[in-house]
Amino acid sequence: MFRIGHGYDVHKLVEDRKLILGGVEIPYELGLLGHSDADVLAHAIMDAMLGALALGDIGHLFPDSDEHYKGADSMVLLEQVCRVCRSNGFTVGNIDATVIAQAPKLAPYIESMRERLAEVIGCEVSQISVKATTEEHLGFTGAGLGISAHAVALMNKF
């Protein structure tokens, strides 16, 4: 049995924050604003996994009203989502994700993101696809005001 879920996340770029995508710190003068580390890629992936199992979204599991999650490492949250999925009898078949950012250029970091995500999820790197694109200077991401990510997760019943 297979289940498919889609996730989306967006965060504003601001000064004095680290830019973390897929659990990898990217050197850049701006970072993403959020209650946790604001890793939009990890957040979209978690929402896709949870959505596939009709378990809500990360805001339900990790509410931003809970100070416990302030500044949280999204890789720790991803581990918790994986435990929830396993407790419901599912593992990741594959993840396909796209990060939308005008800057910085993400190509040099894609493999590191794939490796880090696979490590945390407990799957092969070949099961994780991460792509990056720009918005050709259109919209808020094209203007460099934020970064967004989409993810699709195929979850396998075990």
Image (tube, helix red, strand yellow):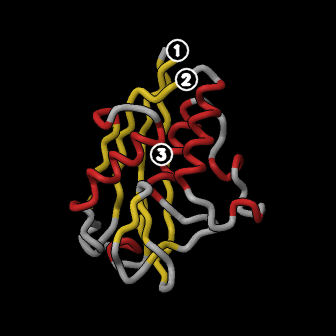
Of labels 1 and 3, the one closer to you? 1
Indicate whether 32 appears above or below 39. below
Which label was assigned to residue 45? 3
Instruction: Using the image, tell me which numbered label, if any, was put on residue 10.
Output: none
User: Which residue: 47% across, 59% down?
Assistant: 40
Q: Residues within 10 Å of mark 1 (few under 14, many from 20)?
A: few
Q: Is residue 81 placed above or below 94 in the rendered structure?
A: below
* 77, above or below 142, in the image: above
Marks 3 and 1: in contact by CB < 8 Å? no
Provide the residue designation for mark 2. Answer: 90
Mark closest to the chain's N terminus, 2 or 3: 3
Identified at 35% across, 41% down, the residue is 96
The count of marks equals: 3
Residue 156, given in percent of the width and then of the height, sits at: 47, 21
Disc 1 residue type (three-letter): Phe
Q: Amino acid at mark 2?
A: Phe
Q: Which mark is residue 158?
A: 1
The image quarter in which residue 147 lies: bottom left
Percent of width and height locating residue 26: 35, 69
Q: Nearer the viewer, residue 43 or 22?
A: 22
Cβ–Cβ under 8 Å for marks 2 and 1: yes
| Extreme residue in the right direction | 66
